[in-house]
């Protein structure tokens, strides 16, 4: 079977998915292709076009953490979650930059799951892949990346409510395009303060209740200044996503851009997940004619900035990747098609 899964870029709404907030990502036209040729044994032989060494994974997978080389642990974790037992040859190729904040890893996980015959609908697939990613990396990530990867809609951003897991397509207005521009430093989620940020949100929630329902007045009652800043980001960011989705529907790209700029400042100053390279890049992007707004995208700590850009601006003037909102993950060749 052959499966394709897109990457994603988040237009606005970072570090709010794991508290049931609103996010506005889009699946993109770069992604991962995974081809599986089954064999009559229990060994999965895996090659990837971005890894020098192949991997051999014995099925069923008992402990994904012991797969070698380490890059194969994510594949092994997905194989374990799917319950794969039949061996074969798996070929992975990707057009996504790895570790740049465009969810190369969620894209890989979803494509592997589909190619290994994962059953169930998009939501089940997203949940299974999120569990596998958490198991493989130890990072307590939210559901945004996997859900965006499975739910992509051509030409549209996805307003995801991470509390009830509903997804609404919000078309990108004509005349604007989305760029992801690398900051030069790649992100290492496992080594980052991601878990620490999530724990701070949970600590704030123990004091003032769900941040999804909190307002500025409730946030102001938090005694600890660090928790107060973290919670202020989350509460403000959820409101910004809501406003950005409305502005996008109304075609008010200047308003969306201004909200993106605010989001970056909040991630930089209150949530403290930016880097000097990302700050400089966002400032540079904001100074370019035809750029409506820019911010870091994804977890932060390196990776890409996302910019909303007037389509008349030549791609080379902004740099990075000009990304088209794409359809979600799918099987390209099924069992019966060979
Ligand atoms: C990573 C995680 C997501 C989300 C973002 C930040 O991409 O995998 O679940 O938390 O960071 O918005």
Image: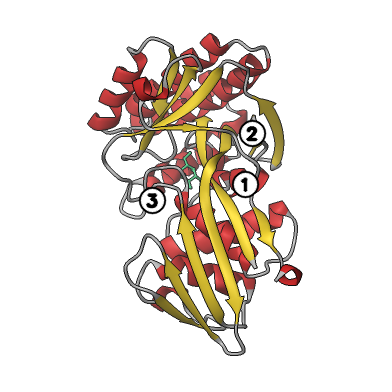
Secondary structure of the residue carrying tag 2 is strand
Badge nearest the viewer, 1 or 3: 3
Q: Position of residue 131 (x, y in %)?
A: 56, 61
Quarter residue 281 falls in: top left
Distance from disc 3 to disc 2, alpha carbons, whole Å, reads: 23 Å
Left or right of residue 108: residue 148: right
Name which residue lies at 47% across and 39% down: 201
Name the residue nearer the viewer: 135 or 233. Answer: 135
> Of marks 1 and 3, which one's residue comes earlier in the chain?
3
Vertical position of residue 82 compared to residue 263: above or below: below
> Of marks 1 and 2, which one's residue comes earlier in the chain?
1
Quarter residue 110 falls in: bottom right
| Image quadrant occupied by the N terminus | bottom right
> Of marks 3 and 2, which one's residue comes earlier in the chain?
3
Left or right of residue 48: residue 327: right
Quarter residue 253 falls in: top right
Vertical position of residue 279 compared to residue 8: above or below: above
Numbered mark located on residue 71 in the image:
none
Q: Position of residue 290 (x, y in %)?
A: 43, 11
Q: Residues within 10 Å of mark 3 (few under 14, many from 20)?
A: some
Name which residue lies at 50% across and 26% down: 178
Q: Position of residue 140 (x, y in %)?
A: 47, 54
Are the residues flagged by discs 1 and 2 in contact, CB closer than 8 Å?
A: yes
Secondary structure of the residue carrying tag 1 is helix
Name which residue lies at 71% across and 66% down: 334
Mark 3: is the Cβ under 8 angstroms from ligand 1? no
Q: Which residue is mark 2?
A: 158
Left or right of residue 80: residue 264: left
Q: Which residue is mark 1?
A: 147
Distance from disc 1 to disc 2, alpha carbons, whole Å, reads: 10 Å
Vertical position of residue 258 compared to residue 40: above or below: above
Q: Which residue is mark 3?
A: 98
């Amino acid at each position: 079977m052959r499966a394709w899964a897109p990457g994603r870029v988040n237009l606005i709404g970072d570090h709010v998915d794991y508290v049931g907030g609103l996010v506005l990502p889009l699946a993109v036209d770069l992604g991962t292709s995974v081809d599986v040729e089954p064999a009559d044994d229990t060994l999965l032989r895996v090659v990837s076009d971005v890894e020098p060494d192949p991997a051999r994974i014995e099925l069923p997978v008992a402990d994904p953490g012991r797969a070698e080389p380490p890059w194969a642990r994510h594949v092994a974790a997905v194989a374990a979650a799917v319950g794969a037992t039949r061996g074969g040859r798996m070929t992975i190729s990707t057009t996504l930059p790895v570790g740049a904040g465009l969810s190369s890893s969620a894209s890989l996980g979803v494509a592997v799951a589909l190619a290994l015959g994962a059953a169930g609908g998009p939501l089940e697939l997203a949940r299974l892949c999120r569990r596998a990613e958490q198991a493989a990396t130890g990072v307590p990530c939210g559901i945004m990346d996997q859900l965006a990867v499975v739910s992509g809609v051509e030409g549209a951003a996805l307003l995801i409510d991470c509390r009830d897991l509903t997804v609404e397509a919000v078309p990108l207005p004509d005349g604007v395009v989305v760029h992801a521009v690398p900051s030069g430093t790649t992100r290492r989620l496992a080594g980052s303060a991601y878990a620490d940020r999530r724990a701070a949100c949970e600590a704030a929630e123990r004091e003032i209740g769900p941040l999804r329902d909190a307002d500025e007045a409730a946030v102001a009652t938090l005694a600890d200044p660090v928790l107060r800043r973290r919670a202020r980001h989350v509460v403000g960011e959820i409101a910004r996503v809501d406003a950005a989705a409305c502005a996008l529907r109304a075609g008010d790209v200047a308003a969306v851009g201004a909200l993106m700029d605010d989001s970056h400042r909040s991630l930089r100053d209150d949530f403290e997940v930016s880097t000097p390279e990302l700050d400089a890049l966002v400032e540079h992007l904001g100074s370019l004619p035809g750029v409506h707004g820019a911010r870091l995208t994804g977890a932060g700590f390196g990776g890409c900035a996302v910019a909303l850009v007037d389509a008349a601006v030549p791609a080379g003037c902004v740099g990075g990747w000009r990304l088209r909102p794409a359809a979600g993950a799918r099987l390209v060749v099924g069992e019966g098609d060979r």
